[in-house]
Amino acid sequence: MTEFKNKIALVKALLSNMQIIRVKPSINWFLTKYMGKFNLLNIGGQLIIHSHLPSVNSKAFIRFINEHLLARTEGPSHAQIGLTNACPQNCRYCYNKNRRGELLNTAEIKQLIQELKKMGVFWLGFTGGEPLLNKDIVEIVKSVGDDCAIKLFTTGSNLTEQLAVELKKAGLSYVSISLDHWVEEEHDRIRGYKGAFRTALRAIDIFKSIGVHVSVSAVISREMLQENQVQEFLKFLISLGVHEAWLSETKPTVEAFWNKASVITEEERLSLVSLQDKYNKEGKITVNYLGHFEGREYFGCNAGNKMVYIDAFGEVSPCVFTPMTFGNVRNKSVQAIFSEMKKHFPSESCCFINKNYELLKKYYKGQSPISKEDTMEMMKEVRFSPLSEFSRLYYKDAPH
């Protein structure tokens, strides 16, 4: 009965924007089925499916419908920006660990945000390093405006109650706090920082107390999967009272993970998808697994196609997990760089980096990201898989 009521509430929320009626019926049916796998949460009046989408009653969601489903803009829908590379923690799997350069200043970041929005971005993630170490983060968040969902990825370092309140007032939609294990000593070991666990729990408490949608961003190791520890971890997250578990497996982004033993199998991916569905039906927590979102049965991998990442130094990559660059926003507009990049990324039904890390290893010369020249050479060898189910429906009878 709860699941039925949730689906009715979802349909009502979607129909509150009549523009959605103009969307192709096959797309609407697909989206309704997909969104129906999650519990619709009401957080301060915002109707939230999960933190990778804007709330369904927001201006950002209206832009999703108008600009992407109806106008079919060629630009990205999702973008992430690194606000700094500084971080007190030292995770082995950190996708930004080895990036170097001259940091973008606040004016450059704010201009970049507006350019991304003009291109179609309605969901924006702020990452790092530790983005809270950027002294202008409140000003940056405020500059985004109320027609774009904003998600903050943080360890919780440098957070105060006052800063959390200011971020909420500035327009922060979601916060995702890094937490990889339910045992304090183990999380601190993974993060290479004593006190990381307590820092994360304190940040969860602070953001929950001011009414922000709180998720935990967890990197699931293959060991946790193979030893059936994920359920124990999810039970711990339920005990914390967070709204969402945002799960991703360890990605082969850095050299230490460029081996088959580190990369998730399709069978393991599907086991996490099943676990997500099980917990979402129970309704105690929203489980949002990246491998479900980017699986062939739903949206697939849209790195370089509907997703773009600009690191703290201005280098443009297909996504946070792909240490390759197509150019720097100081030398060319992000729109021009993205347009060139998209020609090489048609979207596909599985994670790009999980499939192509051996090619990355071939072209790696000790610097991250690999240079544009090496990126272009690498792309000549890449072979993309077929489109995902959503992309197949989206591009059917349309030029692609």
Image: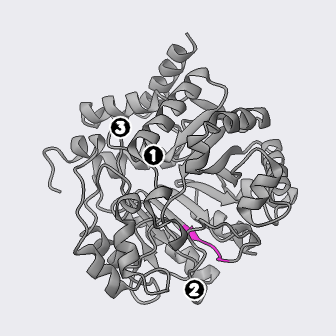
Q: Position of residue 139 (x, y in %)?
A: 69, 70
Residue where numbered disc 3 is placed: 19
Q: Position of residue 264 (x, y in %)?
A: 46, 50
Q: Count residues near mark 1 (Cα–Cα under 10 Å), then give few for <14, some for 14-19, many for 20+.
A: many
- Whether the magenta-drawn stretch holds residue 390 is answered as no
What kind of colouring is applied to the model shown?
one colour
Is residue 366 visible in the rendered structure shown here? yes
Residue where numbered disc 1 is placed: 291
Q: Count residues near mark 3 (Cα–Cα under 10 Å), then give few for <14, some for 14-19, many for 20+.
A: some
- Left or right, residue 400 beside residue 244: left
Of labels 3 and 1, earlier in sequence is: 3
- Left or right, residue 253 beside residue 340: right
- Secondary structure category for the residue under label 2: loop
Q: Amino acid at mark 2?
A: Arg
Of labels 1 and 2, earlier in sequence is: 2
Q: Amino acid at mark 1?
A: Gly
- Left or right, residue 383 beside residue 211: left
- Left or right, residue 42 beside residue 353: right
Q: Amino acid at mark 3?
A: Gln
Q: Which residues are magenta?
A: 81-85
User: Looking at this view, is 76 or 374 the one in front?
Assistant: 374
For the C terminus, the image quarter is: bottom left
Q: Residue at x 32, y 43 (%)?
A: 296
